[in-house]
Amino acid sequence: MHFRDLNESQLLALAITAEEEDGHIFRDFAERLRHDFPATAELFTRMAQEESNHRHRLIDLYRRRFGEHIPLIRRQDVRGFWLPPSWSLLKTLRPEKAREQAALMELTALRFYEAAIEKSKDAAVRQLLGDLAQEESKHEALASQVTEAHAASGELDEEKRMGRRLFVLRIVQPGLAGLMDGSISTLAPLFAAAFATGNTAETFKVGLAAAVGAGISMGFAEALSDDGKLSGRGTPWLRGLVCGLMTTIGGLGHTLPYLIHNFRLATNIAIAVVAVELATIAYIRWRYMDTPFLSAFFQVVVGGFLVFMAGWFIGAS
């Protein structure tokens, strides 16, 4: 059906269902954020209570006007109605994303009530819809007040620190481990093949096999090492995917130059790429792992140089 074809009872039934669904979404947000971001979870708990209050008022009016039976009319049944995305499969949720989604939901609810008022002729229905529209418009102000209170108490700063720690645990650490393994451990087989054969095509095959094999191995190793329930490191498949992908990228970086047929040019470019990879690893360790930059750079360069020399000696012997 189309929105313009709805009568007053159908408008109220749709509003009841929409408020119920929005309340469920806000409660889901609160539960998903409660452990790591309690201040934001409190905000969504209050918003869910507001939606529940709206639903009860709509149901009371529906009973007085149209009786006990409320037909099930959902947003997906009405053409042109905005549908909120499904969050049921999400394992993790960032506070800023949840706030952004909530703002969009409130704006949509406001527009719905404004459009429904124009279609309604019953005074009681128009009055309630108008009241709800005003309350929806105030929700953003409520959210701002709660956010300001949390900021003043320092809770938001703590949430930001927690968000950074979780990002490091769930993304940076597995990604860094993969990048280090892919960039350093594959140096030996790649350059051993290069100096042993002097053939760019054969060297590329060895490097490609080493990069892909290391990516698969590191991905499974990371995913199976920790289920994340006690450590807070997030879902295993995500960490494994990040680790495996970064391992493969690290290995492919100095492998791709061997697509060039000129062996000396390809090797020089590969060595330059290795230098960039090592500098990137050192920067990430300094930026996210609180490691002094010179110390991180020295450790990575020494390790990479030793592995490179191992590959060179083995390939040249």
Image (cartoon, helix red, strand yellow):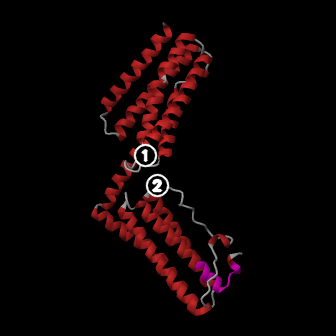
Closer to us: 38 or 110: 38
Residue 104 locus on image (x, y percent): 52, 66
Point out the image quarter for the N terminus. bottom right
Residue positioned 51% across, 19% down in the render? 189
Residue 21 is situated, as x and y percent measured from the top left of the image, at 54, 71
Position of residue 182 in the picture relative to residue 114 (left or right): left
Callout 2 touching callout 1 (CB < 8 Å): yes
Query: Dot 1 corresponds to which residue?
Result: 170
Q: Is residue 173 magenta?
A: no
In the rendered image, residue 10 lying in the magenta stretch gets the answer yes
Residue 52 lies, with reference to residue 293, above or below; the image says below
Residue 154 shows up from this direction: yes
Q: Dot 1: what SS?
A: helix
Q: Is residue 131 visible?
A: no
Q: Mark 1 or mark 2, which is nearer the start of the sequence?
A: 2
Does 236 appear above or below 56?
Answer: above
Magenta span: 4-15
Residue 172 lies left or right of residue 68; in this view the side is left
Residue placed most toward the observer, 66 or 272: 66
Q: In which quarter of the image is residue 117?
A: bottom right
Q: What residue type is labelled 2?
A: Thr
Against 126, residue 261 (above or below) is above
Q: In the rendered structure, find residue 92 and report the number of the disc placed on it.
A: 2
Residue at x 44%, y 58% (from the top left corner): 96
Which kind of residue does numbered mark 1 sit on?
Arg
Place of residue 23 in the rendered image (x, y in percent of width and height, measured from the top left): 49, 72
Query: Residue pushed farthest left?
Result: 153
- Whole-number angstrom distance, CA of label 2 to CA of label 1: 10 Å
Q: Which mark is residue 71?
A: none
Residue reaching furthest to the top: 317
The location of residue 114, given as percent across then percent down, is 58, 79
Q: Neighbour class for label 2 at 10 Å: few (<14), some, many (≥20)?
A: few
